[in-house]
Amino acid sequence: MQLSLRYAILAIAALSVHAQTAENAPGHPANVARPATLRENTGLPPRAAASDYPAHAKVGTVTMAAEFTEHGIPTAEAPLTSESYVAVEIAIYGPEGTRLPVSYSDFSLRINGKKKAIQAEPFERVGTSVKDPEWTPPEKPEKSSSTSLGGGGGDSSAPPPRPPAELRRAWAKRVMQAALAEGERPLPRAGLLYFSYGGKAKGIRSLELVYEGAAGKATLKLTP
């Protein structure tokens, strides 16, 4: 009787270990990543109506609206800037209960009428290029104006100090949070699209946001 009870306890323990191992496996449903939730990619609050944006166009049953923000990146906390990217705030409206699958890859930006438009890029590439325009590096302690050899002060050719890594990560997180959330979600929804462009915004004479996705095709003429 005692031997049978011992085997029963061992069998239950073995089943428990097997269940835990299976649950910890990468493909188990409990461990499948939920990007929008885990990454806190919520986008931006949509404005009251599509007409609140400078550009808007009807695409099937939905309306797309947009505004060019140049090298500025509006976020919930405060604006950031990037010398390597420009951004477009996009909003999508539709009848109540409408859900639309959307991806940043549905959008491209045509600058100055060029035949080839610039494809939107994932926010991961943008985060490393941004900075807070209000941030200034801490002042270094003043060095002696002369050395034992009679030379000058500090090295003016030294590159400016970089922001701390923790601060750069915080900026990158804000870029991610403001990005247009991907996937099939209810409307209205809004967020930022990012495009690689290192030129000066004042050199842009014409601007078109091109959409090709589940809702159809549309071109929004933006104000540079």
Image (cartoon, rainbow, N blue to C red):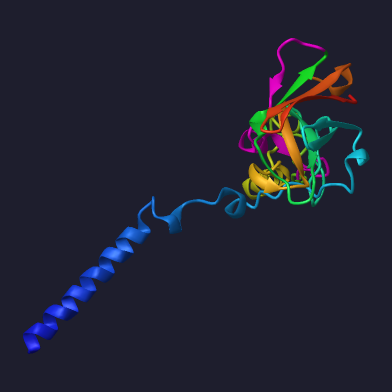
Q: Can residue 12 be seen at all in this image of the molecule? A: yes
Q: Which residues are magenta?
A: 113-137
Task: Answer left or right for 204 relative to 182.
Answer: right
In the rendered image, the residue lying farthest to the top is 115
- Asked whether residue 198 is in view, the answer is no
User: Relative to 71, does residue 20 appear above or below in the rendering?
Assistant: below
Q: Is residue 94 left or right of residue 3?
A: right
Give the residue drawn at x 74%, y 44%. Answer: 140
Question: Could you tell me how many numbered marks the image carries?
Answer: 0
Placement of the N terminus among the 4 image quadrants: bottom left
Say whether residue 7 is left or right of residue 55.
Answer: left
Quarter residue 139 falls in:
top right
The residue lying at 46 percent from left, 52 percent from top is 32
Residue 81, picture quadrant = top right
User: Residue 39 in the image: x percent, y percent?
Assistant: 60, 50
97, 132: nearer the viewer: 97
Residue 134 is inside the magenta segment? yes
Q: Position of residue 52 (x, y in %)?
A: 92, 41
Residue sitting at x 43%, y 55% = 29
* Extreme residue toward the bottom, this view: 1
Magenta stretch encompasses residue 138: no
Q: Quadrant of the C terminus?
A: top right
Q: Position of residue 30 (x, y in %)?
A: 44, 59
Q: Which of the 4 image quadrants contains residue 16?
A: bottom left
